[in-house]
Amino acid sequence: MFKPSTDQSIITGTSYKTSVFATYMALVGLFGRPLKNSSGDGKVKALWIIKTAYGPVSIYDYKNELRPQVNRDWHIGAKSTDASEALVAYLKDQKVAI
């Protein structure tokens, strides 16, 4: 189960686990449009919140100077390594991430 969410409260307590290389449009194709400027301080311009069987996971562009539409380096945040590994495996299975 990989279901997009707009509820930012579910990612409270998550932290960086890994990174993936994927295009913005591939992520939009899987999860819809991201939340924009979600950090309030400009450090995150695009954020997807994904509910998984292992807990919530976030995909975000932390401190990246590029516009989200041309960025290919995305951070993955989660409360557990199982959640982040499940999402990365799903992205690779969908041929979205390398």
Image (cartoon, helix red, strand yellow):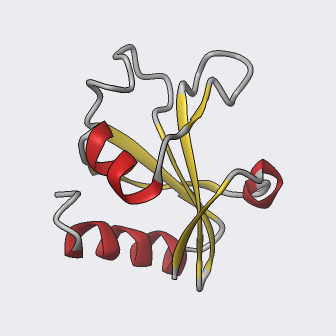
- Taking the spot 29% from the left edge, 40% from the top edge, the residue there is 25
Image position, residue 1 (x, y; %): 51, 83
Count of labels shown? 0
Lateral position of residue 59 relative to residue 28, left or right? right
Q: In this view, does 50 lie above or below 71?
A: below
- Taking the spot 16% from the left edge, 57% from the top edge, the residue there is 98
- Taking the spot 49% from the left edge, 41% from the top edge, the residue there is 33
Report the front residue among 44 and 48. Answer: 48
Q: Is residue 71 above or below residue 35?
A: above
Image position, residue 45 (x, y; %): 54, 24
Residue that extends furthest to the right in the rendered view of this protein: 9
Report the front residue among 11 and 14. Answer: 11
Image position, residue 71 (x, y; %): 29, 28
Image position, residue 30 (x, y; %): 37, 59
Lateral position of residue 23 relative to residue 66, left or right? left
Q: In this view, does 28 lie above or below 69?
A: below
